[in-house]
Image (tube, rainbow, N blue to C red):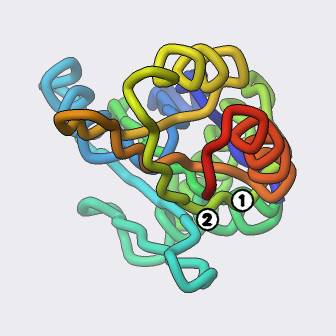
Amino acid sequence: MKTINQSFEAEFEAKKSVFIAHLCPHLLFKEHLNALKSKHPKAVHFVYAFRYLNELGQIVEDKSDDGEPKGTSALPCLNVLRGGELINLAVIVVRYFGGIKLGTGGLVRAYSSAVNAVLDTASLLEFERKKRINLSVNLSVFARVEHYLRQNKLESDKEFGANSVQLAISVSENEQKALLEFAQKLGISL
């Protein structure tokens, strides 16, 4: 499976209708959709599809035709994501109507082509399942742990206490092994 860690955009035109495809990480989907609606107030449709992995390891999917004929826009977008085995991302296609009706087949081709166009510009990454681990760190070694996390690009949530910091860190299996070795050197147990 593949994923992304930043947003991408591409434009596709079919019979004077303009399709602007936006690909973003799933966590930014709602924010991105609202921003696009503000940025493109004259657009006719905001079609979307997304796929993400939930905490149980199940793929969750959703889509919206946003007023386009049923099955002509969101489903083709979702099928492109499925075909590419893409996960934890969303695609939003903004459509400006060009005055010429595309028909059912034309819409399917146009929306699929728009999503393929944005995928061609995207830097796809290998998807790696991560889990959250909790770590309690004494304030005396916190700076070293924080430096390690930054150096290894590990995301963490911090909660400061009187003498310690509680960390919730997202790690892959390999990152967890390396973090465990580092923590043992500092006398920290996971």
Q: In the figure, 71 relative to 50: above or below?
A: below
Q: Position of residue 45 (x, y in %)?
A: 28, 46
Q: Position of residue 174 (x, y in %)?
A: 86, 50
Instruction: Tell me the residue at 60%/62% (across/down).
Output: 131
Q: Position of residue 77 (x, y in %)?
A: 59, 58
User: Is the Cβ of the residue at disc 2 closer than 8 Å to that at disc 1?
Assistant: yes
Query: Pointer 2: residues within 10 angstroms few (<14), some, or many (20+)?
Result: many
Q: Quadrant of residue 129?
A: bottom right
Q: In the figure, 134 relative to 164: above or below?
A: below
Q: Amino acid at mark 1?
A: Val
Q: Is residue 124 left or right of residue 69?
A: right
What kind of element bears circle 2?
Answer: helix
Front residue of this view, candidates 91 and 41: 91
Q: Amino acid at mark 2?
A: Pro
Q: Is residue 165 visible?
A: yes
> Mark 2 sits on what residue?
76
Q: Is residue 93 left or right of residue 75?
A: left
What kind of element bears circle 1?
Answer: helix
Instruction: Tell me the residue at 69%/15% (across/down).
Output: 151
Quadrant where the image shows the C terminus = bottom right
> Mark 1 sits on what residue?
80
Q: In the figure, 187 relative to 141: above or below?
A: below
Distance from Cα at disc 2 to Cα at disc 1: 6 Å
Q: Position of residue 133 (x, y in %)?
A: 54, 59
Front residue of this view, candidates 133 and 103: 133
Front residue of this view, candidates 156 and 118: 156
Front residue of this view, candidates 187 and 8: 187
Instruction: Tell me the residue at 69%/40% (across/down).
Output: 183
